[in-house]
């Protein structure tokens, strides 16, 4: 099973830490962000890592080379950073069969294995790790609606009026159909190809999408202050 990590972004909100370093190599608790991601994915049994690189991608390739802890690494380039759906589309021809994906700026100590188990047992095309948050936080990320039993009924990216307070938490299990959905996604008002829009296309086409509520924590490292916040959680 492949484990995809999206690590192409420039990380402008992480300046000055990313002025001459890709975001994935910013150290958190003595390890680069990508190392935290790789460890999470190895924990659910991936046997190959697929890393989507862009900004200072050669630095990432030079740092890790062609393997991490005896697990092969394949690199895919996203030359223009046009959103997560666009990044995943770049990797879609490289992955084979069921795969898991983690955003490259997430540090997780959570039940990601439960999401993969639900994915297999429900015959879903996509399974999302989600968390119930405040309405204010829901306005700033991907919001998920469900039927109350874990089956996803809709997704929307950064809504002004959130239809729920369940939000995606950066870990996903997918079938190859997501690649086709990403290719069909149109730019949002922000000019980006949004992953929630691609998953919503799967729903529109009749695919099953599941959600598993987070146990533990996943912290998105967007700003320098987040580095300190994660390090406190890891203490």
Image: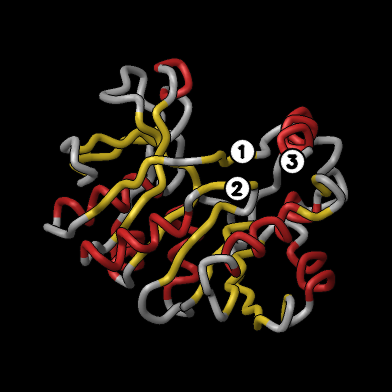
Marks 1 & 2, CB-CB < 8 Å contact:
yes
Where residue 43 appears, as percent x and y from the top left, is 58, 66
Marks 1 & 3, CB-CB < 8 Å contact:
no
Q: Report how many numbered discs are placed on residues in the image.
A: 3
Marks 3 & 2, CB-CB < 8 Å contact:
no
Q: Residue at x 47, y 26 (%)?
A: 140
Alpha-carbon span between mark 1 and mark 2: 6 Å
| Numbered disc 1: secondary structure | strand
Q: In the rendered structure, which disc, 1 or 3, sits on the residue that comes first in sequence?
A: 1
Q: Residue at x 64, y 75 (%)?
A: 75
* 70 up-or-down from 135: above or below: below
* 24 up-or-down from 69: above or below: above
Alpha-carbon span between mark 1 and mark 3: 11 Å
Disc 3: which residue: 234
Q: Of tags 1 and 3, which is closer to the observer? A: 3
Q: Nearer the viewer, residue 82 or 169?
A: 169
Residue 220 is drawn in which quadrant? top right
Disc 2: which residue: 108
Where residue 165 appears, as percent x and y from the top left, is 35, 25
Alpha-carbon span between mark 3 and mark 2: 10 Å
Would you say 12 lies left or right of 191 here? Answer: right
Residue 17 is drawn in which quadrant? top right
State the colouring used for the structure image: secondary structure
Q: Is residue 13 visible?
A: no
Disc 1: which residue: 219
| Numbered disc 2: secondary structure | strand
Q: In the rendered structure, which disc, 1 or 2, sits on the residue that comes first in sequence?
A: 2
Q: Nearer the viewer, residue 176 or 149?
A: 149
Where residue 109 appears, as percent x and y from the top left, is 60, 47
């Amino acid at each position: 099973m492949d484990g995809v990590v999206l690590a192409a972004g420039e990380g402008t909100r992480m300046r000055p830490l990313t002025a001459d370093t890709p975001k994935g190599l910013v150290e958190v608790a003595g390890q680069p962000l990508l190392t935290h991601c790789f460890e999470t994915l190895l924990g659910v049994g991936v046997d190959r890592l697929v890393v989507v690189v862009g900004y200072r991608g050669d630095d990432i390739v030079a740092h890790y080379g062609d393997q991490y802890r005896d697990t092969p690494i394949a690199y895919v380039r996203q030359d223009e950073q046009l959103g997560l759906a666009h990044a995943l589309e770049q990797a879609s021809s490289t992955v084979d069969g069921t795969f898991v994906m983690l955003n490259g700026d997430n540090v997780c100590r959570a039940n990601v294995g439960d999401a993969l188990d639900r994915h297999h047992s429900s015959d879903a095309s996509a399974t999302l790790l989600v968390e119930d948050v405040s309405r204010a936080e829901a306005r700033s990320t991907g919001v998920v609606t469900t039927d109350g039993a874990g089956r996803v009924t809709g997704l929307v990216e950064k809504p002004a009026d959130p239809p729920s307070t369940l939000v995606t938490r950066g870990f996903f299990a997918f079938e190859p159909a997501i690649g086709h959905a990403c290719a069909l996604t149109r730019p949002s008002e922000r000019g980006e190809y949004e992953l929630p829009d691609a998953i919503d296309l799967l729903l529109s086409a009749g695919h099953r999408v599941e959600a598993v509520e987070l146990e533990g924590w996943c912290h998105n490292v967007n700003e320098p202050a987040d580095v300190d916040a994660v390090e406190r959680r890891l203490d």
